[in-house]
Image: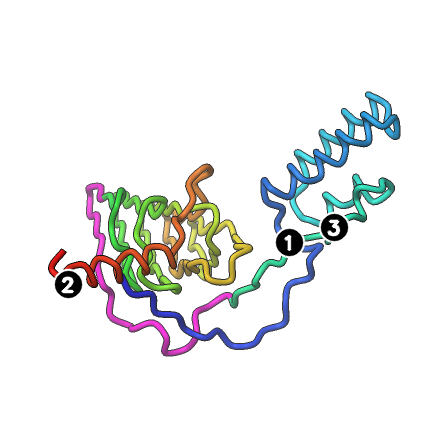
């Protein structure tokens, strides 16, 4: 498959301390605390208290508080090199016409499994429910836009946890909730959720434990298949 990238406009990077903490960030800090306990720098009570704080921390900055007085907290950068993405896709980069529509009117509709995400997907739930699961989807493009509209209904969106996720929208006596993600891989897909919830619910968040496969590997695999077909193998 082909991967079409669009160049994002230059934006001011998000301060490292304000980035949402990942499971890998928490594991790194927990390892430092475990080492400090083994070296006698922390008592068992202090270690337990700090581990509890690590589990409750939301941002990278909150995590660093628990190790900044320990040698291990200064051996590596305070945060991984995230590649901040803009809240909306590059103007004109994504066609206005949808590659696919998922509609549920007094019913339910589901898109999940191994499917091609395309560049734009429209989801409409009117007195119904729509589920869009991208955790096993094939990303042919780096930027994907999902327009989600819920009227007395629900649109649920799930994505792999190692991509970037952004949302722009709101609710009218309803709930519009997108949990932002920042991938450490600058080539990772970016999913933008754009929409409204009117007396309904629109929700987008990562599906823990699901990772998108390496895009470049998939591109190379397609090239190899085409080459073998051309050579008659």
* Residue at 64% over, 54% down: 80
Q: Depth check: 45 or 139 in front? A: 139
Residue shown at 85%/40% (left/top)?
Answer: 70
Measuring from the top left, give residue 208's x and y in whole percent.
Answer: 46, 38
Give the CA separation, mark 1 to mark 3: 9 Å
- Nearer to me, 227 or 102: 227
Q: Are marks 1 and 2 in contact (CB under 8 Å)?
A: no
State the quadrant of the N terminus: bottom left
The quadrant where residue 96 appears: bottom left
Task: Using residue 150 as the reference point, say whether residue 71 is left or right of it.
Answer: right
Residue at point 67%, 40% (across, down): 28
Write down the residue under mark 1: 80
Q: Is residue 29 left or right of residue 86?
A: right
Q: Which sits in the foreground, 36 or 116?
A: 36
Q: CA distance from mark 3 to mark 2?
A: 49 Å
Q: Which residue is mark 3?
A: 76
Q: Secondary structure at mark 3?
A: loop
The residue segment tinted magenta is 87-109
Q: Which residue is mark 2?
A: 231
Whether residue 99 is in magenta: the answer is yes
Circle nearer the viewer, 1 or 2: 2
Q: Is residue 160 magenta?
A: no
């Amino acid at each position: 498959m082909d991967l079409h990238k669009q160049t994002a406009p230059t934006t001011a990077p998000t301060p490292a301390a304000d980035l949402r903490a990942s499971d890998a960030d928490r594991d790194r800090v927990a390892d430092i605390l475990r080492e400090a306990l083994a070296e006698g720098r922390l008592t068992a009570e202090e270690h337990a208290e700090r581990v509890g704080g690590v589990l409750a921390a939301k941002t990278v900055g909150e995590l660093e508080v628990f190790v900044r007085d320990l040698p291990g907290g200064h051996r590596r950068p305070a945060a991984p090199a995230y590649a901040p993405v803009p809240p909306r896709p590059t103007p004109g980069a994504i066609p206005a016409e949808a590659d696919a529509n998922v509609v549920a009117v007094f019913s339910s509709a589901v898109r999940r499994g191994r499917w091609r995400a395309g560049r734009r997907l429209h989801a409409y739930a009117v007195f119904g429910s729509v589920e869009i699961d991208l955790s096993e989807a094939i990303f042919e493009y780096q930027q994907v836009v999902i327009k989600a509209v819920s009227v007395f209904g629900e649109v649920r969106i799930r994505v792999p946890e190692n991509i970037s996720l952004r949302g722009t929208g709101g609710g009218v006596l309803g709930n519009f909730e997108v949990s932002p993600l920042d991938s450490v891989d600058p080539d990772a897909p970016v999913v933008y959720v754009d929409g409204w919830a009117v007396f309904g619910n629109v929700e987008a968040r990562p599906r823990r434990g699901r990772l998108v496969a390496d895009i470049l590997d998939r591109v190379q695999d397609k090239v190899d298949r085409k080459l073998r077909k051309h050579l008659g193998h």
